[in-house]
Image (spheres, rainbow, N blue to C red):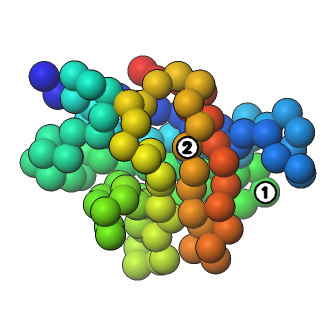
């Protein structure tokens, strides 16, 4: 059974943010299969439903789509360089750490704060 979920990723602990940051987040919508993995087949059937919003308190919000790129999930918007989400093949679960590679190559560590 395919289940489209809204997943909130928040900036995890880092040297600049020792307690993380709720004001720096990604809100992604993807289908999960019965093992809580991104269901690629369901995503390919309805790609316009696979959305992402980047909310960063210091930048304007960015809205884009999630798609498969070079074996990973990526965020693209209006032809800008993609951001890559590294779920590492693990089930998507509350509290899990996820890495995001920014267009400049910087790697941000985020944690799954909610799944609805």
Relative to 17, 31 lies left or right: left
Dot 2 lies on which element? strand
Give the mark toward the camera: 2 or 1.
2
Q: Which mark is residue 58?
A: 1
The Cα–Cα distance between marks 2 and 1, rounded to whole angstroms, is: 21 Å
- Residue 96 visible somewhere in the drawing: yes
Q: Residue furthest front?
A: 89
Q: Give me the residue at 47% from left, 52% from top.
A: 86
The C terminus sits in image quarter: top left
* Image point (42%, 31%), residue name: 92
Q: Residue at x 67, y 55 (%)?
A: 108
User: In the figure, 13 relative to 2: above or below?
Assistant: below
Residue 66, image quadrant = bottom left
**21 relative to 16, above or below:** above
Q: Residue at x 53, y 22 (%)?
A: 94
In the depicted structure, whether residue 93 falls above or below residue 107: above
Residue highlighted by disc 2: 98
Q: Residue 99 in the image: state x and y as whole percent.
A: 57, 51
Upstream in sequence: badge 2 or badge 1: 1
Q: Is residue 59 or residue 97 the one in the foreground? A: 97
Tell me which corner region of the image, top left, top right, bottom left or bottom right, holds residue 75: bottom left
Relative side of 38 to 77, left or right = left
Nearest the eye: 11 or 109 = 109
Residue 15 lies, in percent from the top left, at: 89, 50
């Amino acid at each position: 059974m395919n289940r489209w979920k809204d997943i909130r990723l928040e900036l995890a602990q880092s040297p600049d943010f020792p307690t993380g940051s709720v004001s720096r987040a990604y809100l992604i919508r993807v289908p999960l299969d019965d093992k809580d993995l991104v269901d690629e087949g369901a995503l390919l059937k309805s790609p316009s439903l696979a959305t992402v919003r980047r909310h960063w308190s210091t930048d304007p919000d960015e809205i884009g789509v999630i798609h498969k790129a070079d074996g990973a999930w990526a965020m693209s918007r209006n032809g800008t360089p993609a951001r890559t989400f590294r779920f590492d093949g693990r089930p998507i679960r509350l509290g899990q750490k996820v890495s995001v590679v920014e267009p400049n190559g910087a790697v941000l560590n985020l944690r799954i704060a909610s799944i609805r």
